[in-house]
């Protein structure tokens, strides 16, 4: 993906990314969470705050990833795609309702 493992691990520790375990037991991060066009590679704008909001609301990492990648009716898109499109406030509004 153009980003070093240690950078991803640091982003995970900082709460800027979230990872889940696959059925095979491997821990992974979806590439859609990263802005691969940025130099250096960066986390999609608005994602860290959205992750914090959901985590503070008691949503598990698995629940966060599931929510990010399922179409939300109010957004008419997957939340991760809405974030990538710059719709941070709309995503946070929906996330707030989801978390609390």
Image (cartoon, rainbow, N blue to C red):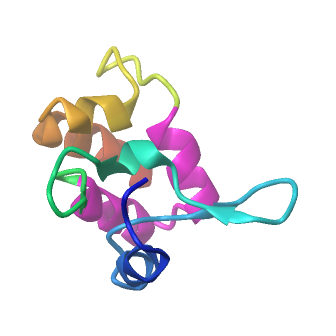
Pick the front one: 82 or 30: 30
- Residue 21 can be seen in this image: yes
Classify 75 as above or below 62: above
Residue 48, position in %: x, y?
Answer: 27, 64
User: Tag count in the figure?
Assistant: 0
Q: Start and end of the magenta stretch? A: 47-69
Pick the front one: 54 or 47: 47
Where is residue 76, by image quadrant? top left
Is residue 30 located in the magenta-colored stretch of the structure? no
Residue 49, position in %: x, y?
Answer: 23, 63
Where is residue 11, by image quadrant? bottom left
Horizontal arrangement in the rendering, residue 88 relative to residue 82 (left or right)? left
Q: What is the residue that sits farthest to the front in this orientation?
A: 2
Horizontal arrangement in the rendering, residue 10 relative to residue 71 (left or right)? left
Residue 6, position in %: x, y?
Answer: 44, 83
Decide whether the magenta segment is chiefly helix, strand or loop.
helix
Quarter of the rendering occupied by the C terminus? bottom left
Residue at 38%, 71% (x, y): give it. Answer: 56
- Residue 100 can be seen in this image: no
Residue at 58%, 43% (x, y): give it. Answer: 66
Pick the front one: 12 or 53: 12
Is residue 61 located in the magenta-colored stretch of the structure? yes
Residue 31, position in %: x, y?
Answer: 45, 47
Residue at 12%, 41% (x, y): give it. Answer: 89
């Amino acid at each position: 993906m153009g980003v070093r493992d240690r950078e991803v691990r640091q982003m995970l520790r900082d709460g800027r990314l979230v990872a889940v375990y696959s059925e095979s037991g491997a821990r992974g991060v979806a590439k859609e969470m990263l802005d691969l066009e940025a130099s250096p590679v960066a986390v999609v704008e608005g994602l860290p705050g959205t992750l914090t909001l959901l985590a503070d609301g008691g949503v598990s990492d698995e629940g966060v990833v599931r929510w990010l990648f399922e179409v939300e009716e109010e957004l008419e898109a997957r939340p991760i795609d809405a974030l990538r499109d710059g719709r941070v406030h709309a995503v946070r509004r929906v996330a707030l309702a989801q978390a609390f």
